[in-house]
Image (cartoon, grey):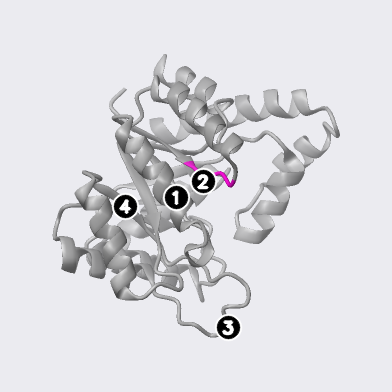
Amino acid sequence: MDKRFSFEFFPPKTDVGRDKLINTRDQLAALEPEFFSVTYGAGGSTRDNTRNIVMDTKKAGLSVAPHLSFGSDNEAAMLSLIEDYRDAGIDRIVALRGDMPSGMGATRLVYARELVEFIRKHTGDHFHLEVAAYPEIHPDAPSYDQDITYLKEKLDAGANSAITQYFYSADAYFYFLDACEKAGIDKPIYPGIMPITNYDNLARFSRNCGAEIPRWLAHKLEGYGKDMDSVVAFGKEMVTELCHILLEGGAPGIHFYTMNQVEPVAGILKALKSD
């Protein structure tokens, strides 16, 4: 299957978590993803942990893309980190606006377009730059069309492709692609997919980030109550089918939000690759 698959991790806070992540990474590496990405906490709050995981992954011989946002850093600190990644042979970055941690006051957010411009200014075309896209609209966007305009600005500034926020409606993704094409966007937009393992956690996370859980899906998952085995089994089946629909409909690949777990992502990808 000529599609791009990638996995996302978040940096663990403990040595135990780090060891577990390395084991997870090594198991998922057997599925030959295009790259692993590593998230970056609000305001750069996980900067060192992110950098350590990124560098360790690169040393293991794997392609890795650190997430990056200015946060509270100045240009000198940001350039130093970017140069460290470049000198280590890392050639991908996920460039984001990011969020300020609580208590940062009115410190100005540096938009992803500005970060893309900054990276291109100082490192040319060395990095493949990914940016974020929102089929169901970014929570802060003034309108659907304006959100697409913001995405186009990031891509026009030099980003190579985009990865979406997770969603569970294929129609939302395909409608979004059509709208992007009409706006003059011709670069790949990879769907981001979040496996379902715990409905309460998913519902809480979705409220915070603006992702929609379709009504039918919410009722189905709520119906399982505390039967977590059924939630996981149904979630795996449903998400696998969603991925099939996306890929058959022309999606260029899938970016999986793994939550630092091997399953059910590994099982989903194996099913997709067996077709």
Q: CA distance from mark 1 to mark 2?
A: 5 Å
Crowding near the residue tagged with mark 2, few <14, some 14–19, many ≥20 C-alpha atoms within 10 Å: many
Q: Decide which of tag 4 and tag 3 comes sooner along the chain.
A: 4
Kindly identify the amino acid type of the residue bearing the numbered disc 4.
Ile
Q: How far across and down, in percent of the image, does residue 30 sit?
A: 39, 19
Pick out the residue farthest to the bottom. 106
Say which residue appears at 34% left-offset and 24% top-offset: 32
State left or right for residue 74 relative to residue 236.
Answer: left
Horizontal side of residue 51 vs 153, given as left or right = right
Residue 176: give x, y in percent of width and height: 43, 54
Q: Write down the residue under mark 2.
A: 11
Report the disc number at residue 93: 4
Cβ atoms under marks 2 and 4 closer than 8 Å = no
Mark nearer the viewer, 1 or 3: 1
**Amino acid type of the residue tagged 2 in the rendering:** Pro
Above or below — where is 214 with respect to 5?
Answer: below
What residue span does the magenta drawing correspond to?
Answer: 9-13
Residue behind mark 3: 105
What type is the residue that disc 1 sits on? Answer: Thr
Mark 1 or mark 3, earlier in chain:
1
